[in-house]
Structure formats: C-alpha cells, structure tokens
C-alpha cells in the first residue's frame, strides 16, 4: 500500500472529486487515482458512505480532492500549469479540458468543468520569457492576444 506523501495539494470540490480525479488520470501522463475514502458518518455536505476524499496524482504531483459542498469555490488563485512540448500536446490537453464541459480563458488558461483552473503552457513560451529582452516582450505581446497558445505564433514572435 502506498504511503501518504508528507505534502499534498488539497482541492475542494462540491461533490465530484472522484469524477475529476478519474478525468485527470485518463488525460495526463503520470496521473492516477490512488485511493477513494468514504465518509464514516454524515457530514454537512453529505451522508455516511459518500465519497469524502480522493487521493490522486496529476503529472506526478500528489493531490487530495475533498468533497466539501458548495461552501467554497475555485478561483484563478490556484491553477495547475502543464508544460507542453508542441502544438499537438497543447491541443490535446486544452481540447480535453474545454471539451469535457470546461471553458476557455486567455493566455493559455482554461477551466475544467469542476472549476479548477489550468495553464496549458508550451515550453517555447516559457523559454521565450526566460530569454528576456525584446524576445520575451514579443512573445508576451503575442500571448496576450491568444486564448489557447499558438506555438507557431510564439516561435514567429521570438524571431521577430
């Protein structure tokens, strides 16, 4: 039996932590549902036997989903940032999230159907920002016009 990591990201869901975790496990590499724990008694947002927490990983990052009800909502203050190697990988993750009831935002951000925010970020964009100077400025200005990141457009902006 796997041991519980010393530190985990806890994500609040209304009632669908297990569905979210299974979606992430099916979508991203090095992701899995590790355990599902049921409530031993009734609680404010559920009944005894309901799924209370789900332990899972997203791209190797340990997480626990808590079915806490509608007391708190997700915000852009927390997001998963997924580094992609090319346009095909960017499209695959973006389309999986948005196409499963999620919604597009801007600058590579999207939100899944459970309200969790994602940044689908091609490495070419990260590299352009790290380069600094005019190259970073051109790539940044190009990104500011996008929803899903267009790798070819970022590469063109980097070149000037």
Image: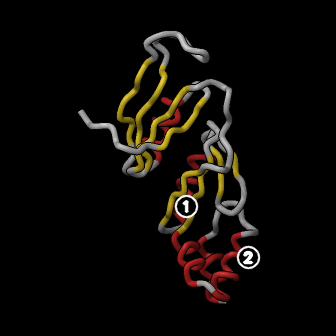
Q: In the drawing, does residue 160 fall left or right of residue 96?
A: right
Which residue is painted at 43% across and 13% down in the image? 40
Residue 48, position in %: x, y? 48, 10
- Furthest toward the left, the residue is 1
Mark number, residue 141: 2
Which residue is painted at 47% across and 10% down in the image? 41
Residue at the disc numbered 1: 90
C-alpha separation, residue under disc 1 versus residue under disc 2: 19 Å
- Furthest toward the right, the residue is 145
Q: Is residue 110 above or below residue 43?
A: below
At label 1, counting other C-alpha atoms closer than 10 Å, the crowd grade (few under 14, some 14-19, many 20 or more) is many
Q: Quadrant of the N terminus?
A: top left
Q: Nearer the viewer, residue 142 or 41?
A: 41
Q: Is residue 67 above or below residue 159?
A: above
Earlier residue among tags 1 and 2: 1
Count of picture labels: 2
Check disc 1 and report its element: helix, strand or loop: helix
Which residue is painted at 55% across and 14% down in the image? 43
The image's colouring method is secondary structure
Q: In the drawing, does residue 111 fall left or right of residue 36?
A: right
For discs 1 and 2, the disc positioned in front in the rendered view:
2
Check disc 2 and report its element: helix, strand or loop: helix
Q: Nearer the viewer, residue 27 or 126?
A: 126
Q: Quadrant of the C terminus?
A: bottom right
Residue 69, position in %: x, y? 62, 24
Mark number, residue 66: none
Labelled pair 1, 2 in contact (Cβ < 8 Å): no
Which residue is painted at 48% across and 21% down in the image? 51
Residue 147, position in %: x, y? 71, 60
Q: Is residue 64 above or below residue 69?
A: below
* Occupied quadrant, residue 135: bottom right
At label 2, counting other C-alpha atoms closer than 10 Å, the crowd grade (few under 14, some 14-19, many 20 or more) is few
């Amino acid at each position: 039996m796997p041991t519980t990591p010393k530190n985990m990201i806890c994500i609040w869901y209304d009632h669908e932590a297990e569905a979210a975790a299974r979606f992430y496990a099916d979508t991203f590499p090095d992701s899995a549902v590790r355990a599902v724990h049921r409530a031993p008694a009734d609680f404010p947002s559920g009944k005894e036997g309901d799924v209370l927490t789900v332990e899972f990983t997203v791209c190797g990052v340990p997480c626990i989903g808590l079915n806490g009800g509608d007391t708190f909502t997700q915000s852009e203050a927390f997001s998963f940032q997924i580094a992609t190697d090319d346009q095909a990988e960017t499209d695959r993750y973006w389309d999986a999230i948005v196409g499963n009831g999620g919604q597009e935002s801007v600058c590579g951000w999207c939100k899944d159907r459970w309200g969790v925010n994602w940044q689908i970020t091609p490495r070419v964009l990260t590299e352009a920002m790290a380069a600094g100077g005019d190259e970073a400025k051109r790539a940044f200005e190009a990104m500011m016009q996008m929803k899903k990141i267009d790798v070819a457009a970022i590469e063109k902006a980097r070149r000037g």
